[in-house]
Image (cartoon, rainbow, N blue to C red):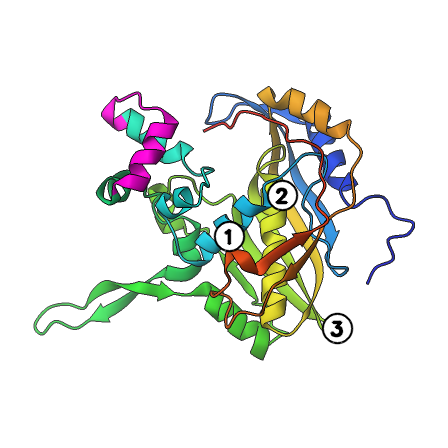
Amino acid sequence: MLDRSHKPHPERPYLDLLHRVWREGSPRRDRTGVGTRALFGQTLRIDLSDGTVPLLTTKRVSWKTIVRELLWFLDGGTNIRPLLQEKVTIWTDWPLAKYRRETGEDISQGDFEARIVADEAFARRWGDLGPVYGAQWRHWPLFVPTNVEGEEMLYRRDPKGIDQIARLVNDIRNNPASRRLMFTGWNVAELDGMALPPCHTTYQYFVGDGRLSGLLHQRSCDVGLGVPYNLMTASLLIRMLAQQCDLEPGEFVWFGGDVHVYENHGDLVAEQVSREPKPWPTLRFARRPASILDYKFEDFIIEGYEPHPSISAPIAV
C-alpha cells in the first residue's frame, strides 16, 4: 500500500486536469456543433491498493448508474431497454435523436423512454445502439467457413463471436506475465454501425507482486461529464477481475487522447474546482460470484461516500 500521509488528495490531479484543459485547451470545432477546448495526451494515475475507488467527491456522481451500465456491458447489452428498466437514462440521447430525425416526431425524452420500456417491438426497432461496447466485449465478430459442395468457400458470422472478457480472465489466471492481457471495443469494421464509437477503447492489465493493475486508453474524453464515469468504470473492472483471479488491486492508469471540455461547461468547471475534495469512498463486495459475468448490483457496496452536491451541465450529442 502506498503511503498517502504526505500526498495531495487523490482527486486533485483530476481537478487540475479539468481546470488546465479549460484554461489552456485549444479551441476546436466538433461534430456536435457546441465546440470544445482540448489538450492531447494526458495521464492520471490512481492507487486502488487501499480499497478506495475514484468516485469524485467535488460533485455527486451516480455510482449506481455506473455499476448498472458496467453490468449491462458485461452482459453484452446493446439495447437501452434493460437500462431504462433500471431507471438509467444515460444512453437515451442517441436513439432518441435518431428517432426524431427519421420519423419527424418531436417526442419528449420521457415519452420515448416510456415507449421503449412498455413496447418490446418498439424497443427492438428504436432502442438498439448497434454493436457498441457490450457486443465487442462479449461477441467480437467471428466468421467461420461454411463448405458448400460445388461452390467457393463461404463464410458465416458466428453469433457468439469471441468473448474477450472470458479470454481475459482465463489469461490473467493462467498466464499472468503475459503482455497480452487486454481487450478492446475499437472494431474498425463496425464503427459505422454504432450509435457512438467507443470512447473508452482499450483496456490492458498487469500482474505484479500479487496485485492487478489496469490501464485504460480513452480516445475521446469529456472531462466534465464523461471522465468521472470512465474512471470509476475502469476501477470497478480492476476490482472485479482481481477478486475473480485471487489478486489484490494495484494501480489504475488512465490515458486520454483528445481530452476536452465543452464550451458550454464553463460554469461546471468554475464550481467544481472551487470545492474542496472529501475522502474517497471504499468498495467491498457482498460476495464472490462464480464468474466475472455473475455479479449483481447488490454485490457492490460503496461505503463512506459523502460528496458535494451534483452539478448539472448539458450533454452534447
- Please give the residue where the numbered disc 2 appears in the rendered image: 256
Residue 250 appears in the picture as rendered: yes
Query: Which residue is pictured at 60% across the width and 64% down the height?
Result: 286
| Nearest to viewer (mark 2 / mark 1) | 1
- Please give the residue where the numbered disc 3 appears in the rendered image: 209
State which quadrant residue 211 falls in.
Answer: bottom right
Look at label 1 and name its amino acid: Leu
Q: Pick whichever, 259 or 118, lies toward us.
A: 118
Residue count near mark 2 (Cα–Cα under 10 Å), binned few <14, some 14–19, many ≥20: many
Element at label 1: helix
Which numbered circle lies on residue 70? 1
Q: Is residue 197 placed above or below 105 in the rendered structure?
A: below
Among numbered discs 2 and 1, the one appearing first in the sequence:
1
Query: Which residue is pictured at 59% across the width and 66% down the height?
Result: 241
Q: Pick whichever, 197 or 160, lies toward us.
A: 160
Magenta-drawn segment: 102-119
Q: Quadrant of the C terminus?
A: top left
Residue 9: image location, x then y, percent: 82, 44
Q: Quadrant of the N terminus?
A: bottom right
